[in-house]
Amino acid sequence: MALFGLMLVPFYIDRLGVAAYAVLPLATTITSYVLVVSDEISNAFSRYLVIAIHGDDQKEANKVFTTTLIGLGRAAIFIVPVVVLISFISPYAFQIGPSSATSVQIMFLLILLSALLMSFSACFNSIYTAFNKRYIVNTIRIAYLLLQVFMIVGSFLIFGPRLEFIGLAYIVSSAVFFVLMWVTSKKLCPALKMERHLHSKVLLKEMGGVGLWAVLNRVGLLLFIQASLILVNIFLGAEEQTRFAIVATLISMTNTACIIITTVIAPFLYLNFAKGNKINLIKISKTSMRFIGLVIAFPIAYLCVFAPQILTVWVGESFSDMSNVITVMFSVQLAVCVVTVLETIPVLYLRIRSVAMVTLSVGALNIIITAAVLILSGLGTMGAAIVWTLAMLSLNVVLYPLIIAKMTESAWTTFLRPLIPGHIALVICAAVGFAVVQFFALPSTWLAVLGVFFVLYVIYLVIALAIGLKREDKDLIRGGLPEMVTKIIPRWLI
């Protein structure tokens, strides 16, 4: 799914121009702040619904579902005036290049409204989580993105490039997404119904308490790459922000890929928590961390080593000098991705407050230090990249693993050790790669970049998974895979 956004970037730059394109990442960044409220409340609600469904308590499940619908509906209505205000002031708050103020306002309004609709659709997410059917959500999301891309590319080619067409594509595809989520959820769990008389203010307050800290934690996370993007626009201008947005898009792509994996893992964590099996919950978390680390180590190393060639074929040679920024920021990206596995645990234990406070504190420091560096130093986007990297390093390699270990009453190294295999693989791959480029120049063509990547990645995966995972890790992973898949994969590999 992340590839859709990746492929559209050069199309946008070619059609809109560098300065005009800068407005779009700003709109999607602001959207992240709007989505955070209902998304995180929905994640908190999932805990209650999964426990009710696995406890065979249909009345309680309907009660949670009804309260979720009403709670998210009210949250969405409350946010609408904020959306309108943000849309109105957007051309005056940011540097928008040659784009007209009206076009920017319309695009912001439509994209933000689509975000609200997507956000309200999140009330159905917990149903798929409870029944371990998250692949349905991913399938619908792919259809949503395909429709969005088709509408944007088609309207640009037929009528010419206009920001309003992007907003229109967002709102239409979001409406289709909502309908598909609603219809498929009804088929998956027809017994789950909204019953107005079951709405509970007490339950809403309880779930809202968990959701509030989840929201604050997610807001804290948005004080990093999204905030850095906005600061670069304010202090360095639209064109520099576009250059930084190129790297931010790659960061988002890897985050999205890892989130897809962690959403598959989450139902198993919910199930074991509902059964009171803390040992297995910790074991699944550690195995997942090792697995994700090994899987993404080579792609990150490959991106860092061949960043100039990848940037040249993707967005043009004029952006190839951003390769050093990519290397700096992706040096910590493996840890960021691996630790996403642990995000579910504070919600399960109803102890997300400590995580949120730490995230907000480090996020605030990231904003303050980034602003100071951009104003006082001549480092430009590299300054923002260095500050972001140090902030994410402190969170994901130090603070989060230690907090979760304390929360689960485990040894302080419990969630630090699973970070090691992936980072060893990353260092080895990067060292070999940088040594090879001293004697071999990869051609700047898609065929060369993708061909070499896929061949080497297959070889790497066979070696890394065969020797990097313990036998118990492989057995645990095989237990969560469909039977048709386990028949294909040899036991020595997984």
Image: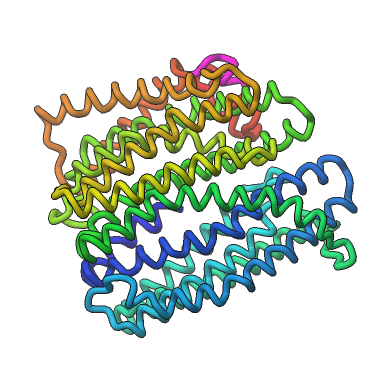
471 drawn magenta: yes
User: Which of these two is toward me, 356 or 199?
Assistant: 356
Residue lying farthest to the left in this orientation: 439
Q: Position of residue 25 (x, y in %)?
A: 35, 63
Number of marks drawn: 0
Tell me which secondary structure the magenta stretch mostly adopts: helix
411 drawn magenta: no
Q: Quick check: can you spot residue 472?
A: yes
Q: Position of residue 84 (x, y in %)?
A: 50, 78
Task: Kindly indicate the quadrant of the structure image that contains residue 236.
Answer: bottom left
Q: Position of residue 88 (x, y in %)?
A: 42, 80
Answer with left or right where residue 282 lies relative to residue 98. Answer: right
Q: Position of residue 16 (x, y in %)?
A: 25, 73
Task: Kindly indicate the quadrant of the structure image that contains residue 8.
Answer: bottom left
- At x 57%, y 75%, the residue is 80
Q: Quick check: can you spot residue 312?
A: no
Answer with left or right where residue 354 lies relative to residue 314. Answer: right
Q: Colour mode?
A: rainbow
- At x 44%, y 33%, the residue is 396
Please give the range of residues in magenta. Answer: 469-475
- At x 40%, y 57%, the residue is 4
- At x 64%, y 73%, the residue is 77
Q: Is residue 61 above or below residue 429?
A: below
Q: Is residue 177 above or below residue 135?
A: below
